Image (cartoon, helix red, strand yellow):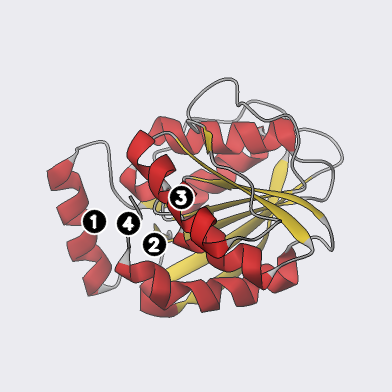
């Protein structure tokens, strides 16, 4: 069954504008937590020179992604795969870029940890990981709407909530990635771009809070 997420129609073009500057000229883009599949269909159409690989751990989401894929009928939009970002092993062995939209705040911390670790394993040198969503930042007041949103998320599941961008940076460092860009987006969201370095991080560092 094809599902709809109202936010997808609002944010897809601003996200696409950033992706146009960050994605490679060719290759395979792995989208983590594709949800309804609306972004996958839109971005595959927007970037016909790239293969777009949607994924999600939820069977209902996979069905929706497949419905959007069938309707779009795009040769570069691949069938969705079942993938849990928190898993130690992913069912894909290559990727020239990774995109993840609105996942890290509506999943346990282990999902963000697995996402950065997986990006470190999968991405070649210089390749991007593009994250979009609401984040906390040290020294920056959280917008009132994001305060309420964070509160509602934690009421649904105590493991959910807006993550600190600095925590994501620490996870990236451990995986051999470095943040290369921060873009302010509509509705108090951010796009954070990380790129794979030539050599991995030191794997250590102090424990910090999400």
- Residue on which the image places disc 4: 3
Residue 200 vertical placement versus 165 (above, below): above
The circle on residue 150 is: 1
First-in-chain label (3 vs 1):
3
Q: Is residue 108 visible?
A: no
Please name the residue shown 60% across and 26% down the image: 90
Q: Secondary structure at mark 1?
A: helix
Q: CA distance from mark 4 to mark 3?
A: 8 Å
The circle on residue 134 is: 2
Please name the residue shown 15% across and 44% down the image: 156
Q: Residues within 10 Å of mark 2 (few under 14, many from 20)?
A: many
Q: CA distance from mark 2 to mark 1?
A: 9 Å
Q: Position of residue 11 (x, y in %)?
A: 44, 73
Left or right: 51, with 189 as reference point:
right
Q: Pick whichever, 169 or 10, lies toward us.
A: 10
- Give yes or no for contact between labels 2 and 3 (Cβ–Cβ under 8 Å): no
- Give yes or no for contact between labels 2 and 1 (Cβ–Cβ under 8 Å): yes
Left or right: 19, with 145 as reference point:
right
Please name the residue shown 65% across and 72% down the image: 46
Give the quarter of the figure containing the C terminus. top left
Q: Position of residue 79 (x, y in %)?
A: 58, 43
Q: Tell us which disc is closer to us: 3 or 1.
A: 3
Please name the residue shown 85% across and 44% down the image: 125
Q: CA distance from mark 2 to mark 3?
A: 23 Å
Q: Quadrant of residue 95?
A: top right
The circle on residue 65 is: 3
């Amino acid at each position: 069954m094809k599902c709809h997420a109202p936010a997808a129609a609002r944010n897809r073009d601003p996200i696409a504008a950033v992706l146009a500057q960050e994605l490679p000229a060719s290759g395979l883009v792995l989208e983590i937590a594709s949800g309804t599949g609306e972004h996958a269909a839109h971005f595959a159409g927007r970037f016909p020179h790239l293969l777009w690989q949607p994924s999600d751990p939820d069977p209902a989401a996979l069905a929706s992604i497949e419905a959007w894929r069938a309707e779009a009928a795009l040769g570069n939009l691949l069938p969705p795969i079942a993938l849990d970002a928190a898993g130690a092993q992913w069912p894909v062995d290559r990727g020239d870029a990774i995109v993840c939209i609105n996942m890290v705040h509506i999943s346990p911390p282990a999902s963000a940890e697995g996402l950065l670790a997986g990006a470190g394993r999968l991405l070649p040198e210089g390749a991007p990981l593009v994250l979009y969503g609401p984040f906390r930042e040290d020294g920056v007041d959280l917008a009132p709407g994001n305060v309420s949103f964070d509160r509602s998320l934690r009421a649904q599941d105590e493991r959910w909530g807006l993550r600190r961008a600095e925590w994501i940076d620490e996870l990236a460092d451990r995986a051999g990635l470095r943040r290369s860009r921060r873009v302010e987006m509509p509705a108090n969201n951010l796009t954070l771009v990380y790129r794979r370095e030539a050599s991995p991080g030191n794997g250590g560092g102090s424990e910090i809070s999400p």
